[in-house]
Image (tube, rainbow, N blue to C red):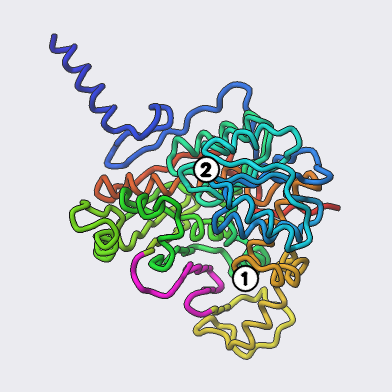
Amino acid sequence: MKKIFAALFIAVLVASCCGQGSNDIGYVIKDNQIVYNTPPRPAGQQSMLKFAAEPIEHVRIGLVGLGDRGSGAVHRFPYLEDASLVALCDLFPDRVEKAQKILEEHGAPRAKYEFSGEEGYKQLCELEDIDLVYLAVPWQLHTKIAVYAMEHGKHVAIEVPAATSIEECWQLVNTSERTRKHCMMLENCCYDFFELTCLNMIQQGLFGDVVHVEGSYCHNLDPYWDNYQGDWRMKYNKDHHGDVYPTHGIGPVCQDLDIHRGDKMDLLVAMDTDAFQGQVRAESRYGAGFGKYANGDNTCTIIRTRKGKTILIEHDVVTPRPYSRMYQVMGTKGFANKYPNEGLALGSDEVKDVAYDDLDAEEYMSDAQRDALMEQYKHPIAKDVEELARKVGGHGGMDFIMDYRLIYCLHHGLPLDQDVYDAAEWSSLVELTEVSINHGSMPVVMPDFTRGEWDKLEGLTFAMAE
């Protein structure tokens, strides 16, 4: 009898330590660390590292979600060569018609197909003449629709974050590997001009060995909460601790560190403040008796990589601080930051053909020196499309560069700049930070979505057609 009770106790203890979903993708607490499991790759699946699909002569796009982000995409798509928007879908049919009028205003043909309602996306995904499903819906629907699209033979591009749980991250990885369809998260901040140029400088050796990076999403959303249909974003923050929107900060700096292209994120610790301003905002919205607002006013996450680098990520959407994605790069030969002011401080002997009196990195370069160096090391992709990107816009042009690169790679049959492992790794912070905080900021051993292949590639590359 004692053995039976002991077995039952152990079973209950293990169950209490496991995360959402099956034990294969959950976690256990071991040696004062939360250890996430990396399940073996199911039979018949193959890695998507450097995956290239067959070239698509003309990419036919189906767009699901026509709110703020979706309607912005409708404005950009007419400027893309080798692609056209052929299907539109939204919960509300009037948004579909508004999108059609946007296309007409740009001189583009109206989309051939229109769908609406809660399951209109299924009809869109089931179309035979669609190559890419582009998702701009609430976070909670991203994985559900993306999986359905891939299972119906479509490549997928998903707004950020791509998933809200580790279970969803694995769903995206496994579905992409099984169906051999691209699954790219639309992390537009990777394509901002400053971040692209710094990435090029890093790859050219100007920063030496990058040892620490920082990123964030600090954006007071007071003017925007009403824009989210059904109040879904405030409700999500109300119900969850952790960094619920990490990818704008983590995406560019993971590229700087070659994450899963020679290094990997190993250990995470998250800590948050109490919900001082968040509670006030929620009570003004729902009334004083609604309960406790979960998300801290500021959440800090520190990550250590396998090669001994560190990453700091912050999230704050309720305090009246100026907008910031932080973006800092600290290397053995220099430093860069974007907020509150763009600055460079370099002590690198790799700087060529630039006459500077002082490159000892003790203080920032002058604005003129910085601008000259940024121009010299402007990323080739930015050079190629900058004029059109700034004209079309979308967060200063980075949205258009993102769309341009997505279509370019699909058209030429090239690996995408971001793969499904990026989508999973960057989005995994949503659950991992919450679990760390819920366990008193306990360290989390992160899952490896590449299943041991994080060091198979040598650095990040953007594929180009010959």
Q: How many marks?
A: 2
Mark 2 neighbour density, 10 Å: few (under 14) some (14–19) many (20 or more): many
What's the mark number on residue 78? none
Residue 258 appears in the rendering: no
Quarter-of-image position of residue 36? top left
Outermost residue toward the left?
2
- Residue 348 in the magenta stretch? The answer is no
**Which is nearer the eye, 194 or 266?**
194
Residue at 22 percent of width and 52 percent of height: 290
Measure the alpha-carbon separation of dots 1 and 2. Answer: 25 Å
Q: Are marks 1 and 2 in contact (CB under 8 Å)?
A: no
Residue at 64 percent of width and 47 percent of height: 63
- Residue 322 in the magenta stretch? The answer is yes
**Which is nearer the eye, 289 or 181?**
289
The magenta-colored residue range is 318-341
Q: Amino acid at mark 1?
A: Gly
**Which is nearer the eye, 320 or 64?**
64
Residue 216 placement, left or right of 235: right
- Residue 353 locus on image (x, y percent): 74, 81
Element on which disc 2 rests? helix
Q: Amino acid at mark 2?
A: His
The quarter of the image holding the N terminus is top left
**Magenta segment main secondary structure:** loop
In the picture of the structure, the residue carrying the numbered disc 2 is 142
Element on which disc 1 rests? helix
- Residue 456 locus on image (x, y percent): 63, 42
Residue at 55 percent of width and 74 percent of height: 334
Outermost residue toward the bottom?
357
- Residue 398 locus on image (x, y percent): 64, 65
In the picture of the structure, the residue carrying the numbered disc 1 is 396
Quarter-of-image position of residue 368? bottom right
Quarter-of-image position of residue 20? top left
